[in-house]
Image (cartoon, coloured by chain):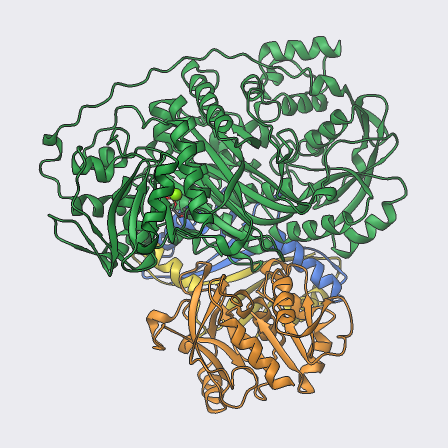
Chain colours: A green, B orange, C yellow, D blue
Amino acid sequence: MIEVNEKIAIDHGLKKDEYKKICELLKRNPNLTELGIFSAMWNEHCSYKSSKKHLKKLNTKGKKVIQGPGENAGVIDIGDDDAIVFKIESHNHPSFIEPYQGAATGVGGILRDVFTMGARPIANLNSIHFGSPSNKKTKSLLRGVVQGIGGYGNCIGVPTIAGQTSFDESYNGNILVNAMTLGLVKKDKIFYSKAAGLNKPVIYVGSKTGRDGIHGASMASAKFDDKIEEKKPTVQVGDPFTEKLLLEACLELMRDDSIIAIQDMGAAGLTSSSVEMASKGKLGIELHLDKVPCREENMSPYEIMLSESQERMLIVLENGKEKKAKEIFDKWNLDFSVIGKTTNSKNIELYFDKNKVANIPIDLLSEEAPEYDRKWKKSKLPQKIKFTKKDFKNLKITDVLKKILASPNVCSKEWIWEQYDHTVMGDTIQKPGGDAGVVRVHGSEKAIAATVDSSASYCYAHPFSGGKQIVCETWRNLICVGAEPIAITNCLNFGNPEKPENMGEFVECVEGLNEASKYLNFPVVSGNVSFYNETKDKGIKPTPTIGGVGLIKNYKDMITMDLKETGNIIFVVGKTEGHLDQSIFAKEVLNEKKGPPPEINLFNEKNNGETVLKLIKDKLIRSAHDVSLGGIMTGIAKMCIKGKKGINFYKYKGLIDKFEFFFSEDQGRYIIEVKKENVDKVKKILDKNSNHYDLIGEVIEGNISINDEPTLSVDKLADYNKDWLNKYMVN
Amino acid sequence: MKSSVIIFPGSNCDRDMDVALKKFGFKNKMVWHNDNVIPKSDLVVLPGGFSYGDYLRCGSIAAKSNIINSVIEFANKGGLVIGICNGFQILIETGLVTGALLRNKYLKFICKNIFVKANKTHNKYFNKIKKDILELHIAHNDGNYFCSKDDLKSMQDNDQIAIRYCDSNGEISEKSNPNGSIQNIAGVFNEKKNILGMMPHPERVIDNCLSSNDGSYFFENLLSNMK
Amino acid sequence: MKIKVIVTPKNGVLDPQGKAIQQTLNSMNFIDVSEVRQGKYFEIETDLKDEKDAKKNVEDMCKKLLANLVIEDYKIL
Amino acid sequence: MKIKVIVTPKNGVLDPQGKAIQQTLNSMNFIDVSEVRQGKYFEIETDLKDEKDAKKNVEDMCKKLLANLVIEDYKIL
Ligand SMILES: Nc1ncnc2c1ncn2[C@@H]1O[C@H](COP(=O)(O)OP(=O)(O)O)[C@@H](O)[C@H]1O
Ligand SMILES: [Mg+2]
């Protein structure tokens, strides 16, 4: 075997100091297998060495939280002994290298995180971000990613109910693919990854191990450079069919109490799964690597430990349950092998052909892993831009609206979500295209709403405000379908933590999201950090993605955003101040990219949200939509398009300019549709709760009509909205 | 009425079908692909999904499973057999219905509501349904129905074309054809019309809170014919 | 021994994948491409020692599984 | 002129289809089959008259579209 030295350690992505620390801790030099194990466990992806310090501050507690961060996924209580397990995870680097397989295995990985805990997956979501549409690679990356997400989710039979897609040139060399899964489990049947008990058999199940993805975990944390070509062969291929079998087999085995601990083999495969189970149980673990089912010949212990072959699980079983467990995996035609046992050595001990090939104290891999307090730079709030009437002089509202509706970040994403099976399992009651996806809790009156959101330009302009904003937007999207927001998961996609600017973006976004999460009582229960999203020294815009989950007690109370009937009155709840900086209007129409993002007033945010939710529960609202990208006008236009209805705007009476009124992106606002006979009731409730509101128009047939501008046909707008992506992908 | 839904490795609409059949009054049993006999049934359903991951050709590997022989036997005796989506592909691969299901014309998976016009003559599946145009749901990659001219003619002559894609007004045209199927065919019968293979999923549209409720008519009609 | 097999869509059977590839190639400036047909290729590793036996066996596999003779032809290389 | 191309998964890359086919063949009593790898096969009809040109052109197509070089190899027959 190769003699390990500092250079080899550095090739494994370790820093000089880190290698030195390993030798000191071990009191000897590691051998190659051991070095591989250290490099995987001490890697950013597994150790969270740059982020840990800041993540500790997150608000993770709440009355409904059953399991916060630290397990395979978070768990929340939704009543009647039911719980929802959910998490979001990134698969950015692999998806850039091989979009189909990268995205597919991303979905596969997050599904495993959820069913490892005993939950049957009931919904998938995805948040995907690509470079500028004019970038050469964008189209094929988008196509590959969408087909990969669909290919995996559709095959395994879990509906993809919502998502988010954005384009920005900062992703030209680093696309983002974040996948989220929700699962349903009974509260007393949740499985954890903490091993317990001595001499318990350790079982390997699922697919065979090949040389795929060796060093995937280090790749996920390495910045891209010109050497990227060399790293290509490490891409894993997903097999959703096997995952479906693995899902059914695991759930079948979970019906009784044979399992003590279970952990999927994700990043760093057998290494991280075995170390984590042992570490949580404060135990040792002994593995016989020649018993690991291999797909290829002559695989070395090093390769077996670091392989990232997909669709595999590690289980600690009760003694005596092996036979029954094996029968289940045989039935599903999956590999099953007893590969080791738990021990009291507190070490991970590996054997191969009867030789001991590695022996490392588990603590050194987990607790002793490095933790950094990286330097970070505080950002300044940019100066507000002073727009004047002159800036809007030659603009027509109708032209602006058309342009915004057809812009890449606002246009309809139907081309994407029509390729995702969003109805399998028969419980989808709100499909993609609304504010949140909604599925019924099978066989009950309850329903679960879920959404993913992010806002890189706000975060880039001012990380702290952006971090707050995104949690609030998630909250609003849940409220808009009538769901009570319960908890969130987060996927923190950032540049290089070794650069103070990037690290600062991270720190401040996390602070912002934490502040909103606390104020709204909307705790973080799971998440994932993806650093080093940079190419040739250029990082992406900071992109924290928030996945939110909410509960609808009776699914019949769910509402949608499409306008329902002519004659109804449209309100905007929340104050319109005219904040245009960082808006899509400023960027797309005025070509102004500077300025601060809109401010968040958490008091108003909470107050407006709670009142709107109450109005929905009281059945006083026919449709609702939050005001987001593109402001009131864009929001209304989407409601018109979906409902095939129009609106007649009342003569505008406010103080601010009409462009500011229609296109500003002030936060904490909702558009609601109210029956005429309920208008007074609604006003009274809004007044009583001190919510600011404006009555802005009335639902009519087929057109958007604004006093002094030509009317626009909603059918035409629908085409503008839909055509951009269709045409882009066809040509 | 007794029904059986066969589960193949990779089936994923088996539960949905079970739920639908029970909702409309069938006593349903789930049958594992490795079993040799189907329990006593009035109806056998091959559900949707990705049996064997759709590897090789959709439905081709499931068509070699143990249980298929008893499905064929059951069908040959005149028993009612439905194949939905992947189930349709399996029926094609076993030769129980004619034709082939190729990759969708635009090479994309399509998940959406569509409209179909049903053939109501001489069959127990659509005969007494009052609505002329049904809003059902499709979710597939390979639903592009193809057969030879001769086969098409003989199927037409024998009323074997079960449902065709149309628009909300019943117009059957290229525009309302989601996947390139010849003659907008969405489903076919065998000669005796006891076997139905179709791409749309009636089991996903059986409640007003779902994307349509028209699947209910399908199940209600079927049940009324079996009593 | 390794036996190689090619399965192709029969003449007259629509080949949506081939067609899409042709169009894409044309749009990528491979204008001289007038038709593309897509088929499948298999490499079958068998323990049989005699080539004739092995090929006969593979022919049987083609008929029973690898090709759908309604729409496809096969060829053992 | 017709140029034929075979695209196969690279060595070591998982081939789920091939694996499923092998298992099915075994269960159909083709017990001597120890491995199956599945690839794609293309027949490209080109207007070019010179075989060398045509093959060079097809090689370019393989690199740009027909094969995904991250996980596949191609061979022009
Ligand atoms: N990648 C995707 N997968 C599934 N659904 C998507 C995807 N991208 C966008 N959507 C859907 O398109 C709709 C519009 O998205 P978005 O503009 O982000 O909505 P909002 O502004 O309300 O948050 C949403 O319903 C979303 O679920
Ligand atoms: Mg929204």
In the image, residue C20 above or below residue A351:
below
Q: Where is residue C26 in the image (x, y as percent from the top left)?
A: 31, 56
Q: How many labels does the image show?
A: 0
Residue B134 in the image, given as x and y percentages of width and height: 44, 75
Residue drawn at x 70%, y 10% is A23
Vertical placement of residue A54 versus D72, above or below: above
Query: Image quarter for residue A348?
Result: top right
Query: As rendered, which of A551 and A401 lies closer to the eye?
Result: A551
Relative to B139, is B56 on the left or the right? right
- Residue A53, visible in the rendered structure: yes
Which quarter shows the N terminus of chain A? top right
Q: Residue at x 36, y 77 (%)?
A: B170
Q: In this view, does A364 lie to the left or right of A53?
A: right
Front residue of A500 and A490: A490
**Ligand 2 sits in quadrant:** top left
Residue A699, quarter of picture? bottom left
x%, y% of residue C8? 51, 67
Residue drawn at 65 percent across, 13 percent down: A5
C3 up-or-down from A92: above or below: below
Residue in the image at 60% along x and 15% along y? A371
Pinpoint residue A528: horizontal percent, then vertical percent. Answer: 55, 30
For residue D45, side relative to residue A407 (left or right): right
Using the rendered image of the protein, determine whether residue A724 is visible from the camera's viewpoint.
Answer: no
